[in-house]
Image (spheres, helix red, strand yellow):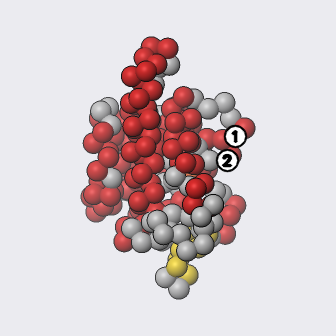
Amino acid sequence: MTNKVIQTISKDSLKLASELWPELKWINNVELREQTLNTWALALQTSPLTVQDLNKIPFTLLVKDCPVTFMEHKRAVVHISRDAATQMIEFFGDNLPIDMDTVISGAILCDVGKLLEYEKVNEKAVQSDYGRFVRHPFSGVGLAMQCGVPDRVLHIIAAHAGEGDKVKRSTEAYIVHHADFMSFLPFMNK
Ligand SMILES: [Fe+2]
């Protein structure tokens, strides 16, 4: 199943995904880096949104006139997650084991399902019917599973948003969850 899906991913999508995410190179494990890249490529070739759209549309539909783009927000979350994990590893060491590859892959993938959550109406991104019924934590897990992404990263995608408040989050999932929310909630108060 996984191999069949991966064979459908085009070279163009892989190129677009790797250009979109320079942070992929931070993932040391080659297999995980490929699985993460493949998931984004699969999402890009399935989505109504283009790379240009991702660099233009607001990162949330919940903030009026949101000044920050989808990609600016997404990349900030990855950088904040990595920096937070670096400090936690330095201060807590073996007392709180953290797998950096899992943090980075999870942060890159946590919103990948949003590419299926939107549709374009009059050149504007709006939530589709599919997106209302199947929010991005669920569609993101669906995409990542098709690319063989391991459970510990699927967990981060599944638990990064409000749905995850009912879940016992891993340390890596806490980091991505807080990086995501600290980059989102302040815009709600502006
Ligand atoms: Fe999200």
Image vertical order of residue 99 relative to residue 115, above or below = above
How crowded is the residue under tag 1: few (<14 C-alpha within 10 Å), some, or many (20+)? Answer: few
Residue 121 relative to residue 45: left or right: right
Q: Secondary structure at mark 1?
A: helix
Q: Secondary structure at mark 2?
A: helix
Image vertical order of residue 190 relative to residue 159, above or below = below
Q: Amino acid at mark 2?
A: Gly
Q: Residue at x 57, y 29 (%)?
A: 170
Q: Residue at x 58, y 56 (%)?
A: 186
Q: Are marks 1 and 2 in contact (CB under 8 Å)?
A: yes
* Rendered location of residue 120, percent (x, y): 53, 77
Where's the C terminus, which quadrant? bottom right
How crowded is the residue under tag 2: few (<14 C-alpha within 10 Å), some, or many (20+)? Answer: few
* Rendered location of residue 87, percent (x, y): 41, 29
Q: Is residue 59 visible?
A: yes
Image vertical order of residue 3 relative to residue 20, above or below = above
Residue nearest the observer in this picture, 48 or 168: 168
Marker disc for residue 162: 2
Report which quarter residue 84 is drawn in: top left
Q: Amino acid at mark 1?
A: Asp
* Rendered location of residue 59, percent (x, y): 51, 63
Residue 62 relative to residue 32: left or right: right
Residue 119 relative to residue 55: left or right: right
Marker disc for residue 165: 1
The residue at the far top in this view is: 94
The residue at the far front in this view is: 190
Count of marks, rendered view: 2
